[in-house]
Image (cartoon, rainbow, N blue to C red):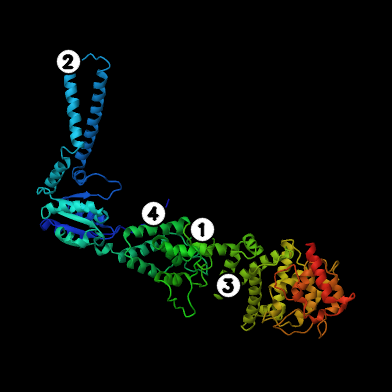
Amino acid sequence: MDQDWKIDKIDTTKVAEAFAKELKEEQPKTYFLNGTWGSGKTEYLKEVENVSNNYFKFIYLELWKPKNKSSLAQNLFEAIYPKLYILKTFLYIAILIITSMASAFISAMTIIPRQLTSQEKIWLVIIACLITTLITYYQNNFFDMDRLLLWLDKRNLQSKKHPRILIVDDFDRLHKDVQNELYLFFNQLNGKTRIIFVGDFDKINKNEDNYLSKIIDRQIGLPVQLQSVNIANKIENKIRQELEKINDPNAKYTTYQNTRDFSFSDIKKLFINEKRTARNANQYLSYVQNQLIFRSKLDRVDLGQELFIIYLYLFHKSNYNKLQNGYKPEVNAQDNIQVNKSDIEQLMDQVLSSRELTIIKYLEKPDSYFIDDLATSHSIADLENILENKEKLKIIFYKENEENVAELKKYLYNKAGLNVIHEKDYLFMAEVAIEVVGSSEYEMPNSLIRFVLQKYASQLYNKRKTKINSKLSEQEKLKYKASADEYVISKFEKIFNKVQKEADHVVTNGKKLHIYRELVDLFNLKQFSYDDYAQKYFKQIIISSEKEKNFGRKPYDAETLLYVLNFNYVHINFSKFYTKVSPTIESQVKIIENLCDTEYIYFWNIYLMNPREFLPVVSDSNLLGVDQLCFSYKGEIYANHVLDRCRAISAKS
C-alpha cells in the first residue's frame, strides 16, 4: 500500500535549543505556550525535551481525557510516579480481593465447622477487620489520601537535584472547575518549579477574570516553522513531490496538457487566514491522496478545482453541501465576481467556473469532483487510446447523447485548434465512422461522427490547397492535378470501398448521399465548389440509385429524392442536376408515394425541415404554407394526403 501523504517533519531544533537554554538558566517560572489545537505545541515541547539532554525531567499532565473522573492529586501522582501509581492500583485491587475472600471465609466458618485453632481464628478475624476498616476509611475520606499525594507531588516537583518541568496539556479544553483547582495548586508552586501551560490563550475560561496574570510569568508563541504560512507551503510542496513520483501517461502525446499542474494560491490564502494547523494539513493531504490516487481522479479532473473542493469538504462543509445541492458557480460577463455573495462563495465562483478547453471541468461533470464519487471523465492517455483503438472508437460512435461523446468531441476540437491531428488520424477516424454508419439503419449518428467527417473533409481541402501552392515534384503534381472536389470525393470513395471490402457493410448509394448531405454537410462546406466532376458524380449516383431493383424500399433511398429536389443548400448556389429549374414535388409524386412507410416518414421529416434527428411524426404546422404540396392528388389536396398517410404510419408504429 502507498505510504500516507503527510507534510515533512518540521525542524524546530534551533528554536527548541534556545528555549531549553532559557529554561535552564532562568529561575523557575510559569509559562503559557499559546497555539490552536493541533498546531504542533506538544511536538515542539518534545523537541525541547530532546535537546535538553536529560537536564530536566519533563512531566506531561493530560487532564483532558473523556470521562476522566480521577482527582487532580491522583492525576499528578500518575504523571510523576507512573510506576508507583500502577503498584498502588494493583495493591488496592489485591486488598479488595483478600478482604472479599476473608469475609467469605469468616461467613463460612459460622455455617461449616473448620479445623482451625482458636488463635488462628482470632488472627484471621483481626486481619480482615483491619483491612476492611482501612478501605472504609479510604472510601469515606476519613483518611485524606489526596492530601498525602499532593504533598508527595509538590516535594517531587520542587526537587533541585533533578529539576522538573510540568507540562499541562490542552489547558484551554479543561472544565472551568478543573482550571480553578489547578490555579489554586500551581499558585503554591509559583517560582519553585517550572510549569508550562499549553493551549489556546483566547479560549481560557478564566481569562476575563485575569487569573492567569497571577500565575503565568511569560506567554510564548510557537516557532514560525509551525505557523500556517509555513504549513501551507509544505502542503503544496508535498503534493507536487508526490505527483512527480507517479508516471504521467499523458506526457508521451503531442497534445500533452500538464494535468499535474495546479494553482494553490487560493487554498493557501484560506489556510493562512483561517489559521489551519499541521494536524489540519495532514488531514487535508490524506483526503487529497485518497481522491487522486485511490479514487483514480488524477489526470481525469482539473487538479486545482479538485483540491479546492476537498478543502471545502473538510473546512466549509455547508458550502460543499451547497454544491451537492445544485449551486452553480457563476462569473458575470466582465469576469467580476458577484458582490452580493459571501467571500467563500465568490471564491467558489472564481475557482469552479473555468471553462477552458483542457480537461473536463467542474461545471461539465460536477459529480466527478465530489468526495468519494468516481471520476467518469477520461485522461488524455485514455482518450488517445480510444482514438487509436477501432473497437473502442466504434462504441463511442454508436452512442447518442453520451457524456463520452461530448468529452471526446471536445478533446478533438482542442487538438484540431492546435493543428496536431494528422491526416492518417483523420483517415482512421473517418473509416471507423463510415463503417458505423454503413452498419446502421435509420440510427442517426451522433454529433461526434459529424465532427470527424466534416473535419476530415476540411483537412483534405486545406491540404490540397497548401500542396498546390508549394513547389511540387512531377510525381506530386500528378497526385494533385484533379480538382479540389474530385480530390476530396475520391478520398471518400476509397473509404467506402475499404469498408465494403473489410467490414462487409455495403455502403449503398443512399447511404453515400446521406453521408455527404447529413454528416459531411458537403454542399454547405465553403471549399466545395460543386464543379463539373462533382455534378457528374452525384448525377451518376442518382441515376444508378433510381435504376436499382426495389428502389424506394431500401434504407436511405429517400436521400435520392432530396438530392433531386435540391434540398435546402443555403450557402452554395450551384447548377441543377437536370435542368436550371428545380423539379417540383408534383413531378416526383409517383416516386415519393412509392416509398416504403419508413422512407416516406424519413423523407418528409427531412424535406419539411424537422430537426436532423429522425422523428416519427409530421405535424399539421409542418404542412401549412407549403405551396408545393397544394396540388390535387387523387381527389384531395396533396398536403392533406401526406398528413393522413403519416398519421396512419405513426398509428401502426
Q: Which residue is mark 1?
A: 374
Residue 184: x, y in percent? Answer: 16, 52
Mark 4: which secondary structure?
A: loop
Please name whichever residue, 174 or 650, is drawn nearer the observer in this view of the structure: 174
Residue 88: x, y in percent? Answer: 20, 37
User: Is residue 216 rendered to the left or right of residue 350?
Assistant: left
User: Is residue 516 rendered to the left or right of residue 407?
Assistant: right
Q: Residue at x 80, y 66 (%)?
A: 649
Q: Residue at x 73, y 68 (%)?
A: 615
Q: CA distance from mark 1 to mark 3?
A: 25 Å
Give the mark nearest the N terminus, 2 or 4. 4
Give the mark nearest the N terminus, 2 or 3. 2
Graded by Cα atoms within 10 Å as few (under 14), some (14 to 19) or many (20 or more), the crowding at tag 4 reads few
Mark 2 vs mark 4: in front: 2
Give the mark nearest the N terminus, 1 or 3. 1
Mark 2: which secondary structure?
A: helix
| Tag shown at residue 4 | 4
Q: CA distance from mark 2 to mark 1?
A: 83 Å
Give the mark nearest the N terminus, 3 or 4. 4
